Amino acid sequence: MKLTVWTYEGPPHVGAMRVATAMDGVHYVLHAPQGDTYADLVFTMIERLGKRPPVTYTTFQARDLGADTANLFKTATREACDRFRPDAIIVGASCTAELLQDDPGGLARTLGLPVPVIPLELPSYQRKENWGASETFYQLVRAMCQAEVAPPRADRAGRPVCNILGPTALGFRHRDDVAEVRGLLASLGIAVNVTAPQGARPTDLARLPEADFNVVLYPEIAAVAARWLERSFGQPFTRTVPIGVGATRDFIREVAALAGVDPTPALDDEHSRLPWYSRSVDSTYLTGKRVFVFGDATHAIAAARIAREELGFEVVGLGTYSREFAREVREAAGQLGLEALITDDYLEVEACIADLQPELVLGTQMERHIAKRFRIPCAVISAPVHVQDFPARRSPQMGWEGSNVIFDCWVHPLTMGLEEHLLTMFREDHEFHDAAGPSHLQSEQPRESKPAVAPVSDLAWSGEAETELAKVPFFVRGKARRNTERFARDRGLSVITLETLYDAKAHFGR
Amino acid sequence: MTAAAAIACRDAAPLAILRERGQREVFCGLTGIVWLHRRIQDAFFLVVGSRTCAHLLQSAAGVMIFAEPRFATAVMEQRDLAGLADTHDELERIVARLIERRPDIRLLFLVGSCPSEVIKLDLASAAARLSVRYAPQVRILAYSGSGIETTFTEGEDACLAALAAELPASEGASTRSLMVVGALADVVEDQLRRIFAELGIGPVHFLPPRRCADLPPVGSGTRLLLAQPFLNETTRVLEGRGARRLSAPYPLGADGTAAWLAAAARDFAVPAARFEAVIRPARERARRALLPHRDRLQGRRVFLFPDSQLEPPLARFLAGELGMRIVEIGTPYLNTRLLDAELPLLPAETLVSEGQDVDRQLDRCRAAAPDLVVCGLGLANPLEAEGFTTKWSIELVFTPIQGFEQAGDLAELFSRPLLRRARLEV
């Protein structure tokens, strides 16, 4: 058993729903008790979808358990097929039905339905949402791509052709990322054959082998299917995810090489403001800001690279809840001289942030909570999604525009450069003290209270030193406390005096 | 004239009852934790379940607004199911970690879920064992909020039933006292306490209490006044301990609240004149608050999907006090015993559907084309996209709607969607 306050991922059948809901013409019959239908509203309320997810739940109750839950499943499947007339049906069990061992796949096969039936085995007690999405997409692709010989490549106009794989319902900015990546591909003269699962029908999946190569936007969801397509149809796929300026450049080069086209025009057409904004003098205050990064593997790795190479931050922590991609995140952390935090335990992440006292947290909605309690600025970079992650305006993470969006949303939560200095100079001013908070962060008014969970310390602070520490502006106070304590500990001091505070300041001063 | 008589009583014409079985678009009982953990301020709810349960609690109810909620999930994993781990040891380890993290907790509920019920995990005996270990600091109880046994508000019923069994016996069995049963917002409880005090009714207790040290006593002198219609099991447990339920409509609307208070006043022999004098100002205020909404809602047709079991009393309020026409009252479970004073007040021939087959019900709803649909969050946006005006039913559970001072707020919940639709020009 595992104590969970918040969970980064839902169960694997929610991943399957994300794939089914993204597609057209797919219906999902889920053997599940009443109550599991809550998952519908994650789509209708968080993503604000104007249609119900294409899911039929068998809704069994305690009194059915001794009777015939298998029959209930068969009836629900038959009725769903009659009512919704899908092109393909996927069937499976949620966590409770898994315990009943009714075998939805076997039961559905006995019905002789007029459409392909794809059974899903999603072990709820071992796997999670992204794995479920990945497995569902892979099974759908396998079932629909039956061609045994390599089909013709390149479109009628002779342009190279690719597929875009990975975007689903309830994805973090998937809608806008796809539009952005399509633009990049168009600028390279590459045609898009199929985008899947978002917007594809089962018959479109059957056409996947017609492309020259695959563009994998979200490895957590599409890497397994892409590897199978590579093995079965000789289709290579992209390894670079174009989040950030550097990664977008790399992506253009990688795609151009796969397509056999010249990357130069697309690289020359770089319209990101990030490089200049980062170089402009007002950004000097970003130098060496200590950031903590946590999210799904793809977004966390990308964020760490942007933070270090494109904004000049210092990455002090990097982690992910995507255990399936632990190796990749460990590698990325290793390059930064860090040990990756691989966990889906929110409390562990909280403890790590409390310990590191970063100046900026780049995380999920969970880390936003943690950061709020520790009064550390935070920007959200990854799923799990919140209604705010479906903004009305276009707001991609990928491509040139994605880098612009990222620059804005990471920098805005920070106390801005000049303001930071003025706050330090005029902190006694009655209208301009740190408790008043930065003017552009009205909703995040800091209070003079201590954070809900103060870092535990084995060191004593003298009254004088504590008072002096309080004069440090709130947004760097945590760092000052931590540095001073580290300094004292390294020197075997048990009490921190005013002298220790300033010795440490001199030691760590940059 | 008593308040009860102010409500026009339907002749014995029967309700049309449709019982359906199929896909239910309703929450399971775990959802009750979302309001119960706010209501009982020193209680913590530990769901013993799956990742699905944890996902439900954090995403379904939008509860991520609480940076530090007083609920969590002990997620069972493969090794728990395969018998590789002793579930009781595991549970003990988790409870120890929780209590260490939250030393302010005085009452811990172990909440059963679908998977824990299917594998027959005995949480009641686990709670008993843990209780011995943590007494007197923390009291540990168990109930089931599983979707195979409970629908949405039945989770509160199961929780309160577990509490009801723990209540101290009242001293002097014949001492008469009133117990208001069902979670209410603090502001509503305070208003009701003032009214009962003015009426001279007392002592008055509320279940659940705000703090677990204040568990009310129960005995044969206890009169139960139900604030919520879904408390079947809780009522049974309390009756088993000698308490007697007062039959009454539920305190929704000006007339509903008056009739609810009147049931207590009759039993406590409050003189009619005094009753009238005490409640008249608030009832008149409530009626005035209803007027503008009545103008907007009168004659409009409303379709209620099943959700909280509050649907029959709500329909009575909408029809009786706001003049709406009821197309269908869906309810997950039609509890005729606890609705004995409500059902006769519904318009004759009203269609009541019990249970649900959501696709068939949606077919009926589309065919009837009502002016307003009251439904859950999974259906609301899709119906809006089809052109229907909807009201999220979950707000009826999360918002203070009971009592005189909330009558206008309750009506506003229904009139606002119509007003909004009329305003928007895009």
Image (cartoon, coloured by chain):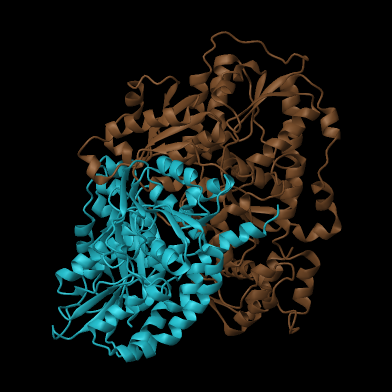
Chain colours: A brown, B cyan
Above or below, A479 relative to A138: below
Residue A490 in view in this figure: no
Count of residue discs: 0
Looking at the figure, which quarter contains the C terminus of chain A?
bottom right
The spot of residue B157 in percent (x, y) is 29, 62
- Which residue reaches farthest top? A149
Residue at 70%, 67% (x, y): give it.
A441
Question: What percent of the width, then of the height, locates residue B109?
Answer: 30, 63
In which quarter of the view is residue A435 placed?
A: bottom right
Picture quadrant where residue B152 is located: bottom left
Q: Where does the image place residue B15, in percent across and percent down from the top left?
A: 31, 55
Left or right: B56 in relation to A415: left
> Compared to A136, does B409 lie above or below?
below
The answer to whether residue A436 shows anywhere in this view is yes
A183 or B190, which lies in front?
Answer: B190
Of residue B267 and residue A305, the one placed in the foreground of this image is: B267
Q: Is residue B386 left or right of residue A181?
A: left
- For image coordinates 66% across by 43% down, the residue present is A302
Q: Nearer the viewer, residue B40 or B29?
A: B29
Q: Position of residue A402 (x, y in %)?
A: 73, 44
Image position of A53 (left or right of A357): left
Residue A22 vs B121, above or below: the answer is above
Q: Nearer the viewer, residue A510 or B180?
A: B180
Does residue B2 lie above or below B184 as drawn? Answer: below
Measuring 28% from the left and 42% from the top, which residue is drawn there?
B81
